[in-house]
Amino acid sequence: MSATLERGYLRLLNFYPAEYRRDRGAEILETLMAASDGRERPAPRESASLILGALRVRAGLVGRDSRPLVLHVAALALLVHFTVMAARRVSPYSFDLSPDVLIPVAALLGAVATIATWRHRPRTAILTASLAFVLFQVTAWPMAGPSNGEFWQVPLAVLLLLPALRQSAPAPARGVLRHLPLVAVPLAGLDGWAGFGAVATVSVAALVWLAVDARVAMALGLLLLNYVLVQVSFLAETAGTGRFTDTVVSLGLAVVSPALLLISSTTVARRI
């Protein structure tokens, strides 16, 4: 057996976590060396396969049911999105003796719901998020409604959290999936074409990452359903008006990213 080839495989195995290498490293190395056919270097396909496998292990994809975790991460991202958007509404006028004082309260409750979700307390998260939603809608009435940008995050998050009431806490998110809720911060802070560009950018990145972790695209697709529901609601409101055609175009653009993310991630997840 070639010492050069063995060193090449060992360098590739270093991409795996130390614990994984201790448990299975020797077995993997033995299998690779036995199938080497006298090569002096790892084949390019072997190298790519080992690196991809290491990234999947680091993402926590080995031997776990990912559905509860995807729902948890998507709900967390939606609550972050709501909290940031509610916080953007806070102004010096929010603290006078008027209904506007409920805006910072709603933002605070949104933060509490976010923390509760992160700590796997679904009952607390659902209750505080629902209260935050009610307070925010009372404050924004009559201007707010289903076509308002702050409307759908909480209902979607609550819907995604309902299965957690009967399930144990999922395994902690790892890798890129762990940080996905942070994507909601810039998405909530950008409007118009800047917001569209941000959505397109993160969507493309998630599609590229499909080969490693399809759960990232799936959770992002669930987050972006918020934008689809806003446009559907706006379409219903503008039916029969001159803005109807523009709204249909906006709805089409809003549907593209979540549709691609959810369909592609579901397809990839079934094949792995």
Image (cartoon, grey):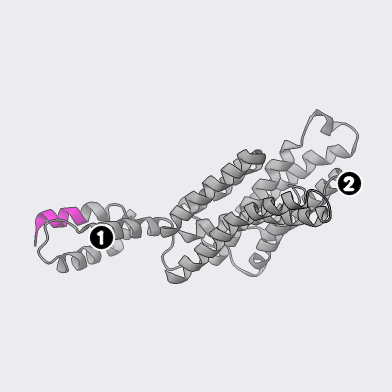
Residue at which label 2 appears = 142
The reply to whether the magenta stretch includes residue 2 is: yes
Work out whether mark 1 precedes mark 2 in sequence or the reverse, and give the earlier one. Answer: 1
Dot label at residue 10? none
Q: Which residues are magenta?
A: 1-9
Image vertical order of residue 40 relative to residue 201, above or below: below
| Image point (65%, 70%), residue name | 166
SS for callout 1: helix
* Residue 112 in view here: yes
**What predominant SS class does the magenta segment belong to?**
helix
How would you rate the neighbour count of disc 2 (Cα within 10 Å): few for under 14, some for 14-19, many for 20 or more? Answer: few
Q: Residue furthest top?
A: 92
The reply to whether the magenta stretch includes residue 199 is: no
| Image point (55%, 59%), residue name | 260
Residue type for callout 1: Arg
Image vertical order of residue 268 relative to residue 79, above or below: below
Residue 269 appears at what percent x and percent y? Answer: 47, 67
> Image quarter for residue 196?
top right
Out of 235 and 158, give the one closest to the viewer.
235
Residue at which label 1 appears = 45
Q: Quadrant of the N terminus?
A: bottom left
Residue 3 appears at what percent x and percent y? Answer: 10, 56
Residue 198 appears at what percent x and percent y? Answer: 57, 43
SS for callout 2: loop
Q: Quadrant of the C terminus?
A: bottom left
| Image point (90%, 36%), residue name | 98
* Residue 185 in view here: no
